[in-house]
Each structure stands twice: as structure tokens, then as C-alpha cells.
Image (cartoon, helix red, strand yellow):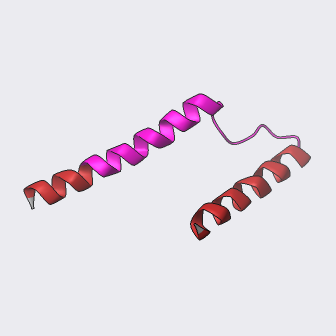
Amino acid sequence: MKELLLSLLAGTIIGIVFKFLRLPLPAPPVLAGVIGVAGVYFGGVIVDWFYKTLG
């Protein structure tokens, strides 16, 4: 839970800084970003599964 809160805090601070500097936010569109993160997570899960199955 601590990692989630720290991640949210860091992202919020970065978003605030970028908006104050009038820079575009360093994030993809919302749905594409969520799907991308889910893909990275599931890719890691699949590799872990292969390691456990084959090793």
C-alpha cells in the first residue's frame, strides 16, 4: 500500500510541476496508458509463469 501512495504522490508532484512550467503532461492518453500498463504487468506475469512451469 505504501508503494501505491508514494507512486500517486510522485505522479501528482510531476503533474503539478509540468503544468506550472506549461509543458505537456508526460503521460499517454488515459485509456491507452491504462492498457499499456496492464500489458506490461501481464507480460511480466506470463514470464513468471513460464519460469515456474519450465524451471
Q: Position of residue 3 (x, y in %)?
A: 58, 66
Please give left or right for residue 32 compared with residue 39 in the image: right
Q: How many marks?
A: 0
Vertical order, 13 against 33 (above or below): below
Q: Position of residue 21 (x, y in %)?
A: 88, 47
Which image quadrant: the C terminus?
bottom left
- Looking at the image, can residue 4 be seen? yes
- Majority secondary structure in the magenta region: helix
Q: Residue furthest left?
A: 54
Which image quadrant: the N terminus?
bottom right
Please give left or right for residue 8 compared with residue 17 in the image: left
Quadrant assignment, res 22: top right
Q: Which residues are magenta?
A: 22-46
Q: Position of residue 44 (x, y in %)?
A: 33, 51
Please give left or right for residue 5 compared with residue 13 in the image: left
Q: Residue at x 17, y 51 (%)?
A: 50
